[in-house]
Amino acid sequence: MHPRKLVVIVAESALEKVLTRELLALGAHGYTVSDVRGRGAHGEREAAWTEDRNVRIEVVCEEEVAQRIALHVKERYAEHYALVVYVLDVGVLRGEKF
Amino acid sequence: MHPRKLVVIVAESALEKVLTRELLALGAHGYTVSDVRGRGAHGEREAAWTEDRNVRIEVVCEEEVAQRIALHVKERYAEHYALVVYVLDVGVLRGEKF
Amino acid sequence: MHPRKLVVIVAESALEKVLTRELLALGAHGYTVSDVRGRGAHGEREAAWTEDRNVRIEVVCEEEVAQRIALHVKERYAEHYALVVYVLDVGVLRGEKF
Amino acid sequence: MDPVVLFFLLGVAARLARSDLRLPESMYEGLSILLLLAIGLKGGVELARQPFLELLPQALGVILMGLLLPLIAYPVVRFLGRLNRFDSASLAAHYGSVSVVTFAVALAHLVDRRIPHEEYAAVFVVLLEIPGIVVGILLAKLGTTRGVSWGALAHDVFLGRSIVLLAGGLAIGWIAGPQALEPHGRLFFDLFKGVLALFMLEMGLVAAARLGDVRQRAGFLILFGTLVPMAFAVIGALCGLAVGLSPGGTMLLATLAASASYIAAPAAIRIAVPEANPSLSLAAALGVTFPFNVLAGVPLYLWLSNMIHGLAG
Amino acid sequence: MDPVVLFFLLGVAARLARSDLRLPESMYEGLSILLLLAIGLKGGVELARQPFLELLPQALGVILMGLLLPLIAYPVVRFLGRLNRFDSASLAAHYGSVSVVTFAVALAHLVDRRIPHEEYAAVFVVLLEIPGIVVGILLAKLGTTRGVSWGALAHDVFLGRSIVLLAGGLAIGWIAGPQALEPHGRLFFDLFKGVLALFMLEMGLVAAARLGDVRQRAGFLILFGTLVPMAFAVIGALCGLAVGLSPGGTMLLATLAASASYIAAPAAIRIAVPEANPSLSLAAALGVTFPFNVLAGVPLYLWLSNMIHGLAG
Amino acid sequence: MDPVVLFFLLGVAARLARSDLRLPESMYEGLSILLLLAIGLKGGVELARQPFLELLPQALGVILMGLLLPLIAYPVVRFLGRLNRFDSASLAAHYGSVSVVTFAVALAHLVDRRIPHEEYAAVFVVLLEIPGIVVGILLAKLGTTRGVSWGALAHDVFLGRSIVLLAGGLAIGWIAGPQALEPHGRLFFDLFKGVLALFMLEMGLVAAARLGDVRQRAGFLILFGTLVPMAFAVIGALCGLAVGLSPGGTMLLATLAASASYIAAPAAIRIAVPEANPSLSLAAALGVTFPFNVLAGVPLYLWLSNMIHGLAG
Ligand SMILES: Nc1ncnc2c1ncn2[C@@H]1O[C@H](COP(=O)(O)O)[C@@H](O)[C@H]1O
Ligand SMILES: Nc1ncnc2c1ncn2[C@@H]1O[C@H](COP(=O)(O)O)[C@@H](O)[C@H]1O
Ligand SMILES: Nc1ncnc2c1ncn2[C@@H]1O[C@H](COP(=O)(O)O)[C@@H](O)[C@H]1O
Ligand code: NA
Ligand code: NA
Ligand code: NA
């Protein structure tokens, strides 16, 4: 298994379009998105309607890309948007994919 | 990156309301919920209708809180409810958030 | 906490039925499935309609089973299907469940 | 055979044949919202036409029946069925409460045959949904030290989705009246049978999915799931006669008594009585009683009500 | 009281009582697609009956009003409300733009009372949705160095869901004409009020969910969220009179002016003005102004339009 | 132009302009369930009116055609298109099978023009969905050692969602008859065109999303995706003539022959022939043939059927 990083971003759904575009620009080769709800410093977001939903974006990538993504998201969006980012260690079989 | 824990709880949807309330009481600052289906010791839960669905709850928190949550869920719910809990290591940039 | 592995498979939804059956045959005791969308080497899969959706399958299991699953999926499906697999370390309280 | 029954059978067949047919969960939810509102609105419009005070004795009689039914079911399950206290109480709650879809099928049965009935009968659904659940939970907790948070439970039961939609529909129908609701009727009333048909397709899929659990205790479940409804239908019909309902209304009340809750009761019991095995009560309510009522019960209860009224009459 | 208002109140009550009632998100989306298309189609069919050139001055007048409204709202919020530049601009954008559901309620109000009106008024919705947002964003960016990607923004605003469905419906209605659309009308037109009722139930749930945020700045929000709509309604009614609308059409334009966007504006502002606090503008638009317009505004604006036409008359 | 075509074009335009308009997936599924059941029910009601034995030769003729079409398509793709065996077989399966929505558009075309036709034609859809897929898979597997689990495959194909709903609808319509289904008709039949319109909007979005893939092999795909349907329409029309259909029914059969499956075939082929590139077949079926049939094919095939019947006499 090749060691890689898994970056998880949970953010308000308004950011999905820009974020996924920027992820690719930052060096990710792919991503996976799901619709979620949640609660955090910005209160409850219960997905009762479209503007009130979060998305959870998952990216497997090399450590360097992961750093870049986490930093970018933090600097560009963390101040004004409801979001969290965290990073995990993963192993993959096909290292060339990520 | 600051080291934190990620607690994942997959449980029957009937527990969503109580669980999320208790998570906050146990010291979590937030959580993320998604609708899922699955299979385990209690058989298949295929989300064909509301009572037959699972939720997946994700909490990033300090190690101590994670221990507390895992133990609480195990003791209070594991006997009678369909659920699993597992804990992972994560890194976060904004340590004060979790 | 008992150490276990978490295998995550993101694959086109056509594979859900076969994959979940095979996971059990390979020694998993359970799994959790959610509907997701994403992008990768096979282009964007935006879940605009049924054939264009991915599923995310999560399995907590022993290391050996995890190896078996990852290898099996890679060998049997990776060539022709849109999918990724990655493996993480997790801790569980009820070791006998997984 | 009534088309809604055919839709149900189609769902059952598709599931048994392991077809990949499934209705999206949000369609199931959407259809049930439509059904509940439609039943409530219809009932509310008719309720406005009734002298309110005359209904009070009927309402009391019906609530009394709702409290009685689980008290009958519990000892049957506990001592004849030899189940533990929790499962017995859970089954008592499910069968003490009611199934709105079964009611809708019975209603459509009457309307198709132009049989007159108390059109405000939706009120009975609201009155009967809760008492059975509450008594069932009390039965489970008798003599237990570990308490239930009754406040939270009452909140969840009284403000559950189905009660809010039914009672809300009743209130809106009552306040707005038939004329103001006429343009809305094209969605809520004209499409009723079509929506019910789709819902029955889903019910067939869901009920058949329970047959695996049924098989594990087939003997008990089949006996319990058919005999109790029939006995309860007799009680319901007698109650209908006693409170002065027409044969049509009597049949509706008999059907309600005979029906088993599979939405409100499971949700409440799961939280209040975690020790009860939910597969068991859903297997009985959904896997046996719902199909039984829809396929055989509804016509049977009509016959029963006519007969009782004939005897009494 | 109009049933759609009762449905709204049911939603509010259910939410305030913390019922677990919620409509699935895809039902919300499906209903809003139906509403937008229905309004567009209806307007398009009628538009085809109008001499196109005669409408041009009306259209220009309406667009001018759309550019004016946020310019009035901004200083009010900024200097009377003492909010920062970003929140002021955000509120100006929300109140400069329009709410389609409020329009639908006003339309149903007229139809129920058989009050004649310009049936192509859906065009005004399309014309008014965008200018307010654009001006609002400009106000936020005045004197800022950090730019906005105007191209991407224009794309998102002009091709947002609601504009595409409304304008698309208008175009289809215009091209196809009433006769070709007759069989589709059974879905889009006959069910309109029922669909609107369901939507209002959801709006009640959503609006009540904002009341927590309202409470935090109750004074300002309640004053702002009721006075500005009333003032804008006067402007809208005068504009309707000026461009030669009937009293019914004038009332629709007044309602549009008085309504606050809670779909297009929040989405656009969130991206273009991230510094603005979205809870604030949604609390005002959804938690105060929407209920106010639906409960009191719509009849008020009808009275206003009749009065203005009477005075001018 | 027919409104359903306009809705399709609206979807295409929205997608090409990169609007954020999308229908929720569960709405897509809900609409397709409604469409399939409606077509099945309608066909079943009419089927009950036919002498069963007279239909047998027609059914056989239609099935034969279904087996023949992929055998024609395969060599064309393989040797003229120079695709590998798997992609050739996959395309043969897609074009050998049928598209229900294309059928619905053709049906609506006839109904709008009051052109008589065999109203039980939904039977042909059921008969034609499967043979093409089976032959296609056989073609892919010819001479391969690695087997297919034919049992599992047959199960998936024969019990796929669309077959179950169509055949189930046929059976229910057949058993229940027109009178019993009348109240359900308000959902299934009266709303048919509206539901079809919404579905076509979604189809426009989905088809346009395939245009990127089309562009990569534009020459081959456009030729193949328009010429094969036209050739198949001729075969379908001749088959219709041979089995004694009216001009209207002949046009429906021609349309079915010309249409390409984008639901049943992709799902089955993806599992049975993983080596085939799904983007290619979807680009052809959804990106080229579906729009071609809807925009130009349907009227063309009506003209063709009338001509062939005219020639024949
Ligand atoms: N501690 C946490 N664990 C998991 N998810 C979180 C946590 N905090 C926030 N979130 C998610 O991130 C979203 C935005 O967070 P916030 O900006 O803190 O409101 C929330 O709506 C949750 O879905
Ligand atoms: N080994 C596992 N890996 C991932 N998810 C699991 C596993 N076991 C159970 N689950 C999930 O947890 C739910 C409840 O588990 P159980 O109580 O074992 O039936 C299941 O329906 C699955 O969604
Ligand atoms: N680097 C990645 N990180 C997360 N998810 C991915 C990644 N690459 C691919 N995926 C997911 O896996 C699916 C199939 O990937 P692929 O076979 O590369 O097209 C995509 O549609 C994504 O949902
Ligand atoms: Na009962
Ligand atoms: Na406005
Ligand atoms: Na074909």
Image (spheres, coloured by chain):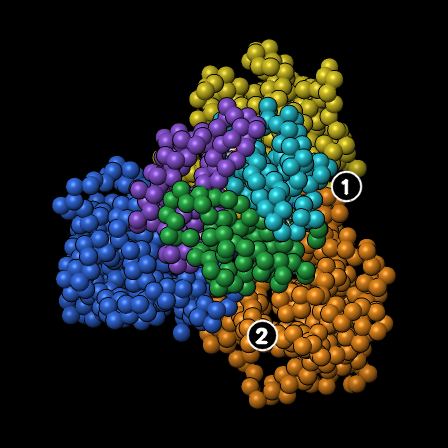
Chain colours: A purple, B green, C cyan, D orange, E blue, F yellow
**In this view, D293 is above or below E133:** below
Is F194 left, or right, of E91 in this rendering? Answer: right
For mark 2, give the secondary structure. loop
Q: Does the rendering let one see residue E226?
A: no
| Mark 1 or mark 2, whichever is nearer to me | 2
x, y percentage for residue F132? Answer: 67, 26
Q: Nearer the viewer, residue B22 or F48?
A: B22
| Rendered image: mark on residue E20 | none
- Tell me the quarter of the image containing the N terminus of chain D: bottom right
Task: Determine if residue E300 is in view.
Answer: yes
Mark sitting on residue D149 = 2
Vertical order, A96 against D287 (above or below): above
Give the image location of residue F205, x and y in percent: 45, 37
Point 54% across, 64% down: residue = B18
Q: Position of residue F19 (x, y in %)?
A: 37, 39
Residue type pointed to by label 2 = Ser
Q: How busy is the neighbourhood of tag 2: few (under 14 within 10 Å), some, or many (20 plus)? A: few
Side (left or right) of F128 relative to B5: right
Q: Chain of mark 2?
A: D
Q: Residue at x 55, y 73 (%)?
A: D152
